[in-house]
Image (cartoon, rainbow, N blue to C red):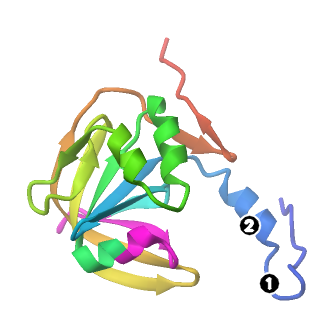
Amino acid sequence: MCYHTRRNEGRGLNLRAFRDTLALYATGVTVVLSRYGLATHGMTVNSFTSVSLRPPLVLFCADNRADTLKTVQQAGYYTVSILGEEHAWISQRFAVAGPQEDLLAEVRLGQGPASGVPYLSDALAFLECRVTDVIPAGDHHIVVGEVEHLGRLNPHRPLIYFDHRYRRLTPEP
């Protein structure tokens, strides 16, 4: 069934229809953090996925203008914290651009053993990644990283994003 074939001002696909359609793909929610020098930057990411087992590779996508992308490129390392359903407030706060010192002071942080890059210690799990490739893709970059360390941290249910809203998994009967 085709819902939208209308073009956006004659230049391509209707962008609102594109966003609304992709919103029907349920995703987990993560926070990517990186540190370079004294600057730590983070952002909410739901475009995160595994790529390969051998070597263990993951990727995320970042807007070209994101401070976190620049920091990841400079540092060569990043962490991914997988959020639980009680972390919607963290996701919302890291989704806003701008200074993050106050936010970073409000969350509990651990440090990746290879790089010292922080991760959210209250998350379900974390991965510490060394950047192996950064690929331009339209208005974003695809960042591929080799996982050097990881850990399961807290046994909670995941935070899910579906149809422009946070969702919860229902408990099994």
Residue at the (25%, 39%) spot, across then down: 121
Q: Nearer the viewer, residue 132 or 55?
A: 132
Image coordinates for residue 155, horizontal then vertical, percent: 30, 26
Answer few, some or many: residues within 10 Å of disc 1's Cα (few below 14, many 20 plus, some between 14 and 19): few
Magenta residues span 51-70
Label 1 SS: loop
Is residue 83 visible in the rendered image? The answer is: yes
Q: Quadrant of residue 6?
A: bottom right
Residue at the (79%, 84%) spot, across then down: 12
**154 left or right, relative to 138:** left
Indicate which disc residue 18 carries. 2
Quadrant including the N terminus: bottom right
Residue at the (69%, 46%) spot, across then down: 163
Q: Is residue 77 above or below residue 80?
A: below
Image coordinates for residue 143, horizontal then vertical, percent: 37, 74
Indicate which disc residue 12 carries. 1
Q: Looking at numbered disc 1 in the image, what kind of residue is underneath it?
A: Gly
Image coordinates for residue 160, horizontal then vertical, percent: 53, 40
Residue at the (61%, 52%) spot, across then down: 25
Q: Nearer the viewer, residue 38 or 136?
A: 38
Image coordinates for residue 34, horizontal then vertical, percent: 29, 63
CB under 8 Å between discs 2 and 1: no
